[in-house]
Image: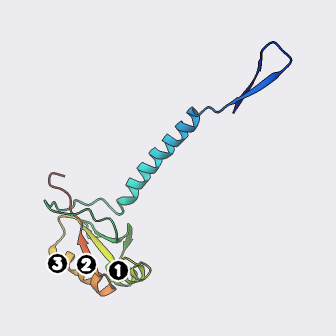
Amino acid sequence: MAARLLSDGGDDEAIVAEINVTPLTDIFLVLLIIFMVTSTAMMQQGSKVSLPSSQSGSPETTGLTITATADHTIELNGVTIERARLRDELAKALAAREDKGVILRGDRTIILEDAVQLMAIAREAGADRLAIATAPPGK
């Protein structure tokens, strides 16, 4: 806050207080940019996979994410996990959530049998809704 004394030639001096909003606006803009970058990064959990493309698909953003990479690595919400432990860890994670949805993010090169097995494990663990993540055509 800047304060300055103004004198009109008399003995009375008035204090004028002004708030400079430019630094405050700069801080808010920086915080907004940081929030936008981190929220985008949080939406893409797990390893990069080449998703299969689909003309029709809805943006599904809620639920636990199982990622199956091209090198046969399995991840649960971005954390690498062994296939033998997937059912138990998924059951624990689903028990702690109200939303029992599971999203399968599989690389387009994984075998269909692997995808079906992962979906069966998710059902056995208690998932009531399954979705397969896809990318729009041309991506």
Q: Earlier in the sequence, mark 2 or mark 1?
A: 1
Above or below, comparing residue 135 to residue 26 in the picture: below
Render colour scheme: rainbow
Amino acid type assigned to the residue bearing label 3 in the image: Glu
Q: Label 2 crowding class (10 Å Cα cut-off): few <14, some 14-19, many 20+?
A: many
Where residue 8 appears, x then y in whole percent?
78, 15
Query: What residue is at 14 percent from the left and 55 percent from the top?
Result: 137
Label 3: element kind: helix
State if disc 1 and disc 2 touch (CB < 8 Å). yes
Labelled disc at residue 113: 3
Front one among 100 and 70 = 100
Q: Where does the N terminus fall, quadrant-wise?
A: top right
Front one among 18 and 82 = 18
Where residue 27 appears, x then y in whole percent?
55, 40
Cα gap from disc 2 to disc 1, whole angstroms: 9 Å
Above or below, comparing residue 39 to residue 110 in the picture: above
Amino acid type assigned to the residue bearing label 1 in the image: Leu
| Residue beneath disc 1 | 86
Front one among 28 and 63 = 28
Labelled disc at residue 95: none
Residue reaching furthest bottom?
Answer: 124
Labelled disc at residue 118: 2
Instruction: Give left or right: position of 7 versus 101.
Output: right
Amino acid type assigned to the residue bearing label 2 in the image: Leu
